[in-house]
Every structure is written in C-alpha cells, then in structure tokens.
Image (spheres, helix red, strand yellow):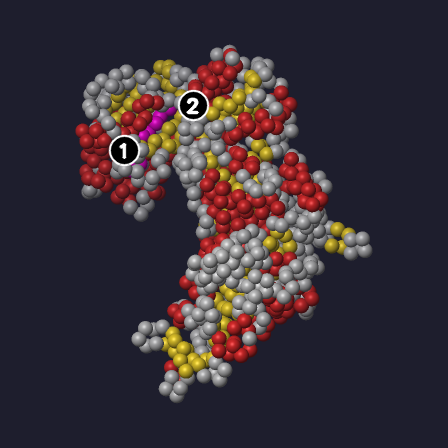
Amino acid sequence: MTSQVSSEAGEALLGEQRSAPAKPHHGTEKEVRRLDRVIIRFAGDSGDGMQLTGDRFTSETASFGNDLSTLPNFPAEIRAPAGTLPGVSSFQLHFADHDILTPGDAPNVLVAMNPAALKANIGDVPRGGEIIVNTDEFAKRAMAKVGYATSPLEDGSLDGYRVHPVPLTTLTVEALKEFGLSRKEAERSKNMFALGLLSWMYHRPTEGTETFLRQKFAKKPQIAEANVAAFRAGWNFGETTEDFAVSYEVAPATRAFPTGTYRNISGNLALSYGLVAASRQADLPLYLGSYPITPASDILHELSKHKNFGVRTFQAEDEIAGIGAALGAAFGGALGVTTTSGPGVALKSETIGLAVSLELPLLIVDIQRGGPSTGLPTKTEQADLLQAMYGRNGEAPVPVVAPRTPADCFDAAIEAARIALTYRTPVFLLSDGYLANGSEPWRIPDVDELPDLRTRFATGPNHELADGTEVFWPYKRDPETLARPWAVPGTPGLEHRIGGIEKQDGTGNISYDPANHEFMVRTRQAKIDGIDVPDIEVDDPDGARTLVLGWGSTYGPITAAVRRIRRENGHIAQAHLRHLNPFPKNLGEVLKRYEKVVVPEMNLGQLATLVRAKYLVDARSHTQVNGMPFKAEQLAAALKEAIDE
Amino acid sequence: MSEPLLHLVPRAEAQQSMKDFKSDQEVRWCPGCGDYAVLAAVQGFMPELGLAKENIVFVSGIGCSSRFPYYMNTYGMHSIHGRAPAIATGLATSRRDLSVWVVTGDGDALSIGGNHLIHALRRNVNLKILLFNNRIYGLTKGQYSPTSEVGKITKSTPMGSLDSPFNPVSLALGAEASFVARTVDSDRKHLTEVLRQAADHNGTALVEIYQNCNIFNDGAFEVLKDKDQAKEAVIRLEHGQPIRFGAENEKGVVRDPATGDLQVVTVTPETESRILIHDAHATTPTTAFALSRLADPDTLHQTPIGVFRSVERPVYDTLMADQLETALERHGKGDLSQLLAGNDTWTVVG
C-alpha cells in the first residue's frame, strides 16, 4: 500500500533482499527459504502470453496478501516479428512482506522464454540472480537472430548467475499429449507451465488461476483443461526436479496494510471506477466520449461494461468528436468525460478552449505516453504537463490533477470531478502509461465515505433588472467560487445561448467591448486560481536542507529513493503534488524553506519550469525520458549528489 | 412506422406564436442576407411543432449561419468550427427529451466539419441539420467554399478555384442518411414544408437550404428563384407524384433502360408512362442519388428540390438507450460497492 509518505513498519529492512531459514514446508522435503521481497520478470515473445502470465502471478500474489507493484512492458505492435529484440514483451512484479513502492529496479529472477528475451533483459539482472530459460528455443537460428554467435547457455557468459535450463516447450507438449492437441496448440500452454513452476517456487496459491483458466476458456473446455494441466505440470516439475532445490516463502504483508478488504487494481481500472463513483456521488449520469488510443483505451472498454450504472459510452469518429460529444452531454447536465493520450489532447485543444469559455464541467483524462507525435505509444512519460497547462489559444486556464499510484487513480478521478462540478470548468486528469498498466493492492473504500459531489442546477431567475423584472443571467457568478450557474435544457424560463465568442459579464450576450474582455479574461483566471485545493504536505523527519518535489507517477520511485537515503542517514524532505493547477497555496512557502529543491520528472523539466517561473526558486531538474519509470537506486544516487553538493 | 421520437419531447402548455421564439438579441446579418428568411421561416414553424421551447436546442458551428442560435429564444450553443454535429450528438444521445437542431453552413459542415457530418448521418442520431449553402465563405470575406463551382474567382483563387464541389445531397445519401432534402431560402412555403417533414423524421434529417449571400456571392441561386427561369431549372420532388417540370410541365425524368441512369425527356404520349414516380421512401438510395446528380453544378439547371429520401432506420440514441435498459434488466441497477470489490479480495484484520 503506497498511500502514505512513510510507512510505520519495516523501513530499516527495505532495499535488500534478505533471507532466513524457515521451517521445512509441508509436502516437500526441499529446503524452504524465507525472503522479505522478490522481483520477478517474465519475458518472452509478444505472442508468448507474458502479460497474462504476469497478471496471473500478480493475482495469486495479491490474494496471498503480499504488497506488490507491477510493471508491464510491451511493444506497440500487436505481433512484433517473432524472436526479435523489439518483439520482446515483459512483465515485472515486485512483491514483499512489507510496504513497497515500486516494481523494483533489478529482477532477482528472470524467466526468459527465448534468446531475444534473455538478451533484452539480462543486462538488468544482477550477478547472482536466478535465470530460468526455455532451452527449447535456443536453436542456432533463433540465437543468431538476436546476435548470439555462441549459445549463452554454454559459452560461460551466464557464469555468476544461477541458471535453470528448462526445456519448457518439450515438457509442456509432453504433459499435454493425452489431450489430442496439435503440437502448436500444446506449445501455447508453455506460459502456464512456467507460471506453475514459479508458483511452486514462491508458494503461490493456485485455485485462482485454475478458476480463471476455466472461465477464460469456458467455450473451449479442452483448452481450459490443457492449460490447467500445463500449470500443474509446471508446479510438479519444480517439486520433483533436483535442479530446483529451494523454494521461497514471502510472508503476507499484514503489518504494511491498514485493516480492510483489499484487491489488486491497475491504474486504468481504478480510474474507471473513480469515474463511475464520481457519477454516483454527483447523482449525474456519466457520459464518455472517446476515441481509441493507447494507453487510454482500457478506460473506454471498462466503462462500456457498466451501462447498468447509467453510463453512456460513445466511441466517436475522432478525438475531436469524442470531446465534443462529452461537452454536449455536459451542456445537457451529464458528467462529461473524454479519455485520451497526448496526441489526442492536441486534437481536443480547441474544444477544451470552448469548454473554458462555456464554463461547463468536463473531465479530460490524459494517459500520457512517450512523445512527441506518435512517440512511444506503450511507454510512459510525463511530458504533457505543459500541454495541459498552456496548450490552447488565448488565456484558457484549466485545473490539472495528477494521481500518484495506480490505486490513487480512483481518488484522483473523484477529485477532478469535484473541481469540475464545483467550479464549472474543464479539468485535466494526468495519469500515464506506468500508472495505467501497473497495479498494486487497493483498500476497497466504503462507498458511504466517498465525498458528496452533488451540485445544483439553476432552476429559476437569478437577477433582477432595474425595472424589477426577474431574469436569468447565465454568466452571473457565485461570489465565492466564481462558478456560473448550470442551467440545463428542459428548465423552463432559463432559455439562454452560450458560445465561444466573448460574452458580456452577467448576461452572457456577445460582447466585443475591450473592458469587458479584460474583465472576463481575468475573472476566468481568478476562478481557477481560487480553486480550493489542500495544502501540500511535507515529509521531513530530520529537518533536511534539500527537498525533493515530484508530481504524478514518480511518487513510488521518489519515495523509495528517499527511504534509501534516510536509511543511510541522509537527510532529505519529500513533497508530492496532486494539484498542478492551481498549485497548493502553501507551495511557495514550502519551496523557500529549503536550500535546494530537486524536481525529478519523466520529461525535460516541465514542473521545474513552472515552479521556477512562479516562485523564483532555483529548482533543479533531474529528468529521464527513456519510456520507463525511474529506478529507485539511480534516483537515490542523483538525490544524494544534490544533497552533498 | 415506429413511434415518433418527437413524442419523447414535452409539449408546450399553451399556444405559441412566432414571437415566443424570437430572442432579445439584435440580428446582425448583412441587410438582404438570405439567413433572415430562414430565421423567419424557422421561428414561424416552431409554434406549429408545439414543443415546450425549453426542450428545444439549437447548436451551431462557426460561420455566418452559425449565429442562428443567438436569435432563437430556446436553449442554444454557438460552438466551434465544424464540430456542431459532434456536440449535438452528445446532447441528443444523453437527452432524448430534447429536440436538437444543428445549424451549419457549407464551409462548416462540408469542409472543416465534414467528418462529423458524415458520421452523424451514418449513425442516424436524432438531429435535424439545417445546412445553409451559399457556395461561398462569407464570414471570412469571400473565399470559395467546398460547394463553389469549379473556376470560381475569389480572393484566394484569383485565377479560379481548382477543386470540384461537393453536392451535399449526394454526399449525405452516400453517408447513409435516412432523410435528405433540399429547399431554397426565399420559398417560405416550401422551406416550411420541408422543415415539417424533417421535424417528424426519426433520426438525422439533413436539409440543404440554398441561401443567398448578397455580399460575396449574390445571385448564386437566381436561376432557381426567378419565376420564369425557375420553371425550367427547378424540379419539385413530391412523394408519389410523377417527376415533371418545365413552363408547361412538358419535361419529365425517366430511367434510361440501357444505363439505369436518369435523364430528362420531353413528355410525349410514348414517354409519359415512363416518367418516374418519386418515391422518397424507397429502400435503397439509388434513385435518390441519381436525382441528386441531375443538377448541373455550374448552372444549377435541373435542380431537384424537396425530400429526396425519407426512410425509417434504427436511431442511434434509441439503440443506446435500449442497451442501457437491457443492461439494467440483465444485471440490475449498478451497485457501486459490489463493483469496487470485484471478485478477488483479501481482508486484513487489525
């Protein structure tokens, strides 16, 4: 669980994989070792089913009660050329008996289903790590394809690793020979064999996977049973083969979790649920206008399943129509949402500007990916911050909210909806590919504790003319929030016209008056600047001189890095922004308290630019744009350098 | 014939008049603009429709015609260039109790917003789209438009425009439109009759209105308006009637048996029996399309006006609402606690 800046328990134990002898496990005479945490990476060809394997291992791990964090990493191509380095798909899972924050820097165990998977991932595995290789795929041609002149299994290049050569394909085919499947069909289950083997190694529960397989292949019972058989064969292989002499236990992370009921959840799923919850809490129907785009499409898929919550999903002809429909629905009184990624935001910009001018509630969900242009569709980045802040013509301020972990996407979605509804404004929700596809345990909230988001539609006149006539003025604002009334069609007497042309204050009629425009521009800005957002909290137990300031998905790696530094008696303060527009009221004061401010970001310094401009602080950027999240160790080194400088 | 979707829109409690639909805003089109006539016709027709005016919404894009919503005392949105059909789609599909009208022009609907127009038509969203076609860009002061004739001399095309124009009726028919009509700004009676049929239609109705821009393209439709010329130039389509025109009603439209295409012939005792009877409800759009091709894009001779096509086809909003109802029947009203909990949980006790 990663919703706290620091955990109460076990900090001194973090970072190192420690092991201790444990009592012999029942049902096997093999040695069982106890570990506090493990990082496993499953890697194979795009078609090898590594994401599914990782998902299943994650589910088993979640139901066992470990804390966990995952990092799926896959190519943009649906079926990249087989056996090539760009075609490698991997899934990394970090699980522990205590509170962890990231999917881990370096895997302790690599499962490599072919030479490409080994070659692409071996560099990340420290010497001493365990490597399980599918030897069946290490034919000369397959090795040559990725530049192995000699077999890495035989030429000594893997010396220093604990290598388990396993003919996974042969064993799977052998195990399934009674199912009457073709060789090709049988081979497909090799990922389940691998999953079975790893499940044995780490004492994972198995019922969930068997139930899952029978449900997934409900229409093909023979395939379902074949997969279950492969899964069990993998387990039994571990138990009986001498090569696997040791198995490991990672105890449930009971102390790391507050009391409650938990599930594992990915960022996109949590975000989808947050939108459904916001709609219920606001008592407004949810309307999603969207165009498919990686890595945001999951939200469209998920919300499409929940029509019985009154959710309408509209797959539009393009990004512009997606947001247009959402805005049209918002005019009609719905909670309008559009979901996209960076290139889609570019196309939606004009409509976002219209929403700023119309002052209607609207959520723009941007699941950021590598850019510019098409960039890296399946990789993560935080480089849309300035686009969200400023990417429109004219002065068009839009609030920006960013979730920090996969599970936090739920709360962030509700918070974005609160701002949109209270202040009648479009709001950006900036998630990213890492949060979207990554997962972690989530304490399922009690729905009675969710915030009340109900808002009032205008029902009657709100202004009295000099002659005493009662009229409705669509741009007469609430003096506190500066929000204008939301008068939805169907309300008698409030017929009014709104549009993108500058409006006269109050009446909303077209106005080209210079003084009025000046007033309206400043008022729209003042409305956003005045949004009530909570103060930023600083975690600073030691009275540090250096502050690390982050936003969004860097929360996990930054917090892990901060823990490393403190474990070595370094002093560093940490603060993390959820609200990027407006910034928390106390941010300037917080920044000025520290001699040094370091801002790690997965872009070239966009938040640093904003805080430097706004607060005149000499914030230094630490940036990375390789499509992957920060590694805690590297980040800790960078922060340490800043502290020591 | 299925239940008219208009029945979902609340009726006005009292008798309405044209005045009820005039907003307090000063109309700011150029004096003599054809838009005035269309505005008057729409304001005059609305009381007949008898809907609660708070349940009527006009959505427009950008261009001269797109100022229209400001002058209607209903709900309205003057949006951005080309996007009105998309915005109206969101409104219409989420609020079936509203009568949603889109006002657009030839540049707005066919150039920058072409994509949204064809997709609205294909989906058959319950929208009434009034496409004011003046064959010119007015608001930007006189560039050629996607309906301008080839060779049009304008500020942006001093040596003549190069691109072939769209025929909006052909385009709409090709985009699977269930209702397509054409009328003329100055023919109040015809315009009103077309509006009547469009309003009654379930699904998207596209009404092309030939509209004179007296500043930048004056007289573009004169051949259809001048009494004498119009007799030769205009073909009035009426469902169930033979397609005949001409000063003496001496011309008629027949199908060429060799090519299947339509052609104009002089009515003689031999040809009379071959004169096409207009069938707006024909299942296929083939003949409607052929009719839309009769007009000469340069001279506008043989321009059919009236309802080309009006057929019943599933309406997107209805289908969307049906799916929501089906989901409710199958799964019951959504239970948020249950959704959040999912199937795979574990409990941590203190």
Q: At x 41% / y 24%, what residue is drawn?
A: A104
Extreme right residue here?
A467
Observer-nearest residue: B146 or A468?
B146
Note whether A630 is above or below B247 in the view shown: above
> What secondary structure is marked by label 2?
loop
Residue that sits furthest to the bottom in the current view = B269
Is there any visible trace of residue A406 in the rendered image?
Answer: no
Where is residue A123? Give x, y as percent: 32, 22
Which residue corresponds to the image point at 55% horizontal and 58% vertical from the top-left? B142
Q: Amino acid at mark 1?
A: Thr
Q: Which residues are magenta?
A: A39-48
Specify few, some or many for label 1: CA neighbours under 10 Å numbering under 14, 14-19, or 20 or more: many
- Using the numbered discs, state the Cα–Cα distance from disc 1 to disc 2 in whole angstroms: 25 Å
- Tell me if residue A46 is in the magenta stretch: yes
Q: Which mark is residue A491?
A: none
Point out the tag, 1 or 2, that comes first from the N-terminus. 1
In magenta segment, residue B59: no
Residue B60: x and y in percent read: 57, 56
Residue type beneath disc 2 = Lys
Q: Quadrant of residue A116?
A: top left
Question: Which residue occupies 53% across, 69% down?
Answer: B221
Under circle 1, the secondary element is: loop
Comparing B324 with A537, the one in front is A537
> Chain ID for label 2?
A
Foreground pick, A612 / A475: A612
Residue linked to disc 1: A84
Q: Is residue A509 left or right of residue B327?
A: right
| Residue bearing the label numbered 2 | A631
Relative to A343, residue A546 above or below: above
Label 1 resides on the chain identified as: A
User: Residue A395: image x %, image y %?
Assistant: 61, 40
How packed is label 2: few (under 14 Cα within 10 Å), some, or many (20 or more)?
A: some
